[in-house]
Amino acid sequence: VATLGVMGGGQLGRMFVQAAQSLGYTCLVLDPDAASPAGAVAHEHLRADYLDPAALRELARRCDAITTEFENVPAQALQQLAQSRVVAPGASAVAVCQDRAREKAHFDASGVACAPYAVLRSPADLATVPDSLLPGILKTARLGYDGKGQRRVTDRLQLAEAFSELGEVDCVLEQMLPLALELSVLVVRGADGQVVTYPVQQNLHRDGILAVTEVPAPQVDAALQSQARESAAAIASGLGYVGVLCVEFFVLKDGRLVVNEMAPRPHNSGHYTMNACDLSQFEMQVRAMTGLPLREPRLHSPVVMLNLLGDLWFDAQGVERTPDWAGVLALPGASLHLYGKAQARPGRKMGHLNLIGATAEAARASARQACALLGLPSEW
Ligand code: ATP
Ligand code: MG
Ligand code: MG
């Protein structure tokens, strides 16, 4: 039996491990946190820092291939592992995804339009920003997620304040675009260069966090869907990427498609694949890193995915409660996925709920009932 390693022990690592185990693999998880969701289901949990030399040696000694489940794993650690083992995705591709300035340069090089932007590295750069980028969004180049590390600014004074608030670290200022809706595309690339893509996902965010994903994307025509899938494939190929990559897009009010950012791993907006496709994004990651066949995945059912954030574990008075799982599980097409996190906190990703149906209307009807039972907004 071959052994696979995972850098990171969050829910994405957990679902990867579960997919790998059903294909017969043994899994090792490296994560410093004793209570990691992936560590709890893996064959073994190495509790150490991602740059710990002994832990990295151990992973390289015991694993045939190693992957990562979170964006900010040090590229240096991946590089070191790659000296003796298959590492997918590779350090250089991950490094591009970890830095918005490099990421945008790669979008430009791939011929895929992104928001007009400028890179700010020091206060002196503020004066070089063209007026056309305001109003805009200032984003730290590294380490941002769920809308953290971002400031919306309308004029130069606010821009200077925001840059200083963000610590004068490297940032990207993007023009604020008029969004009609948000999409994402999962693309999978094998070491031999074969590329497959999943159907386009339509995403709704609340407070900067993904709330709802719907597939097929109800408001996106076939031409735009093809454009999004082809753009994602070009971006992955240009990186020499191996594994599952998620590319986020905006559709603007004038109908244009613009790429936003990418994540070098399976993605929250791809969790619907676990129940609505004949091949999940996690199994794809296993296949890509082990050189098993990739094939076009098939969406067999329309689906709505609802993210389950920690807020659902508290009533209006802030008293902890258990959501009505029995009610939810009685709904047609409902599949519940909980990540085994002991402590709920507002905004914390605790699980997700997939609702599939014979038709998009049926999936949506189940999802609306689930929202009513859970106390989630039923408009999306
Ligand atoms: P994630 O959790 O997806 O990694 P993130 O913190 O990296 O999020 P972004 O995806 O860059 O952040 O932005 C968060 C949200 O802010 C987007 O989903 C979109 O709703 C909005 N947004 C970002 N950039 C722009 C823009 N240039 N114009 C308009 N809205 C934007
Ligand atoms: Mg991001
Ligand atoms: Mg994003």
Image: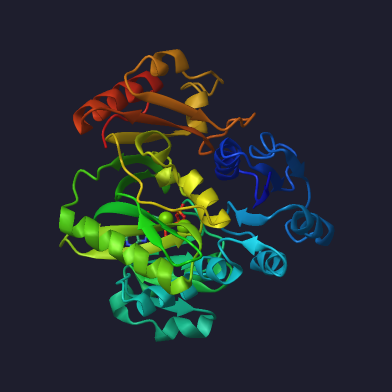
Q: At which x and y percent is residue 41?
A: 66, 34
Q: Residue at x 54, y 49 (%)?
A: 286
Dividing the image into four quarters, tell me where ligand 3 lies.
bottom left
Residue 328 seen in render: yes
Q: Residue at x 50, y 39 (%)?
A: 347
Q: Quadrant of the C terminus?
A: top left
Residue 330, image x and y in percent? Answer: 38, 14
Q: Does residue 75 lie above or below 315 as drawn?
A: below
Rendered residue at 80%/60% (across/down)? 57
Q: Nearer the viewer, residue 312 or 153?
A: 312
- In-front residue for pair 182/197: 197
- Residue 111: name its quadrant: bottom left
- Placement of 276 over or under 261, stated as above or below: above
Q: Say whether residue 54 is left or right of residue 309.
A: right
Q: Is residue 327 left or right of residue 300?
A: right
Q: Is residue 160 visible?
A: no
Q: Quadrant of the N terminus?
A: top right
Figure check: 8 above or below 274: below
| Count of numbered circles on the image | 0
Residue 170 sits in which quadrant? bottom right
**Residue 341: x percent and y percent?**
62, 32
368 on left or right of 36:
left
Residue nearer the viewer, 274 or 202: 274
At 18% from the left edge and 47% from the top edge, which residue is drawn?
219
Task: Say whether residue 195 is left or right of residue 251.
Answer: right
Taking 32 as reference, is 272 above or below it? Answer: above
- Residue lying at the far right in this picture: please name it: 54
Residue 21 location, x and y as percent? 61, 38
